[in-house]
Every structure is written in structure tokens, then in C-alpha cells.
Amino acid sequence: MLDDLYKKIVIEHAKYRRNHKKLDGENVRKVHYKNPTCGDVITLYLQLQGEEIKDVTFEGEGCSISMASASMMTELIKNKDLRNVSIIRNEFEHLIREGKEPLGDIDLGDAMSLQGVYKLRARHNCALMAWQALDKLLSDVSAYKGIEK
Ligand code: ZN
């Protein structure tokens, strides 16, 4: 279902996961999250500085889509303002659930390679797991608006 080029990007991220490590330090939050449909697991670490994501890492195990998506997410949100992260997050969910391309100048980077997942309903949660973990981690932060329900 994913075309060959996109598939390569996904497999590369799943194999060589960016920011795949534990994070220690001041103001580091962490959350453990599980995708019940596929058994994927993630521990997400986030360091905030004011309303900016100073650092983000993860540890996890699971299918290629879930691990690639987590890897891509860390690249997308690091050093970004939480309001921007909210926008990116919602555009990414539209991409996965509806196959809808992001608006205007919003750049989803390598995460665009997951667009084809929208045709694979059973894998939606795999692609969204890292972002749902992020929602959980930032649920008490008003500058961050998680997914529109
Ligand atoms: Zn999965």
C-alpha cells in the first residue's frame, strides 16, 4: 500500500531511529504509552523550556510504522513552540486518518511518507501512537492543544 520510496523512508526510520534514547535532566517529563491494537509501546521523554520543546527522545518497541512515526515526530517537534507543535500534530492526524495533505506552508517532513497509512485503518493507531503519548504528556499545558475530537 505504501509506495516504494515512502516505504524506504519508513523502514530507514524504523531501523535507525532518531533520538531513540532515554532523556535525563531538569524539567524532563516522561510518559509510557501502549497501542493496544498492535502491541507497540513507547516511553516518550520531553524537555520543555517555557513553551518550547527543548529536547524530545523516546524508547520503544513495535512495528515499523509505529517506530518510524515516533522517530519522525521527534525530528518534527524538537526546538519548536508548542502552538506550532499543536498545528503540526493536527495536520498529521488528518494525514493519517483521511490522507489529507497539510495546509499551506506546514511541513511534515519525512512524516509525509506515512500518508498511505490512511488506507490501512488497522494501522492508524500505530502511526498515531507517539502523538497520542505526546497529548498525554502535555495534557496539563494550555499552550498545547491536542487532537480535535
Ligand atoms: Zn503497530
Image: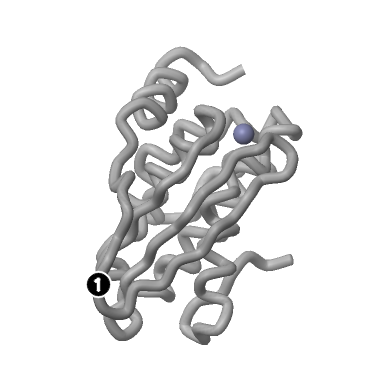
Task: Write the residue at 52% across / 70% down.
Answer: 137
Task: Write the residue at 47% across / 83% down.
Answer: 143
Name, please, the residue furthest toward the top: 4
Q: Residue 117 location, x and y as percent?
A: 62, 31
Q: Residue 44 location, x and y as percent?
A: 44, 58
The amino acid marked with disc number 1 is: Gly
Quadrant for residue 123, please give it. Answer: top right
Q: Residue 47 location, x and y as percent?
A: 32, 71
SS class, disc 1: loop
- The quarter of the rendered structure image containing the C terminus is bottom right
Quadrant for residue 106, please give it. Answer: bottom left
Within 10 Å of disc 1 (Cα), the crowding (few <14, some 14-19, many 20+) is: few
Task: Write the residue at 51% across / 16% down.
Answer: 3
Closest to the observer, 137 or 113: 137
Q: Which residue is mark 1?
A: 25
Closest to the observer, 113 or 36: 36
Task: Write the residue at 32% across / 79% down.
Answer: 27
Closest to the observer, 104 or 15: 15
Task: Report the coloring of the rendering.
Answer: one colour
From this view, report whether residue 31 is shown above or below residue 49: above
